Amino acid sequence: MRRGEIQQFLSLVTFSLGRYDDAFEAAHTALHSVRPWDWKMLSGHYAKSDVYVAQLRELERSIRVKPTATKRFLIGYHYWMMGHHASARTQLTKAAAASDDKLIPELLKQLNETLEQRNRKETGQ
């Protein structure tokens, strides 16, 4: 298993514990070398998807109470893994506006390429 994959797993574990700063750090480290997991890989770590959804909703609530660039990055990363690319782009854009993090623009470029490929596929181009 590559280090980036291990870091993504560590991010998921710390996310599940509500340790969002630690989850951000692990995800950030991972995304320097690997792309985000897809929903199949992410959901495979849960016996029931509703457990994951409850954890995600808790992060969303935390952002409403106290939004930070770190939390917005993390929720954008999770939306990306879930396949909610437009929502991921929105959150990563907000994270970029609140931070001088150099990785976020690179991720937004990757995400925009993913969205363009999907749009071409849907329109048959």
Image: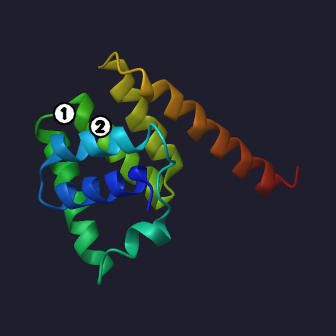
Left or right: 63 as drawn, with respect to 125? left
Q: Quadrant of residue 122?
A: bottom right
Residue at 49% over, 54% down: 84
Up-down: is 49 above or below 85? below
**Residue plotted at (12% across, 49% down):** 19
**Disc 1 residue type (three-letter):** Pro
Percent x, y of residue 60? 23, 50
Q: Position of residue 25 (x, y in %)?
A: 25, 39
49 in relation to 57, above or below: below
Image-quadrant location for residue 17? bottom left
Which label belongs to residue 72?
Answer: 2
Left or right: 64 in relation to 96: left
Q: In x, y percent, where is residue 50?
A: 27, 76
Label whose residue precedes the other's in the sequence (2 or 1):
1
Between residues 110 and 10, which one lies in front from this camera angle? 10
Residue that appears at 34% across and 38% down: 28
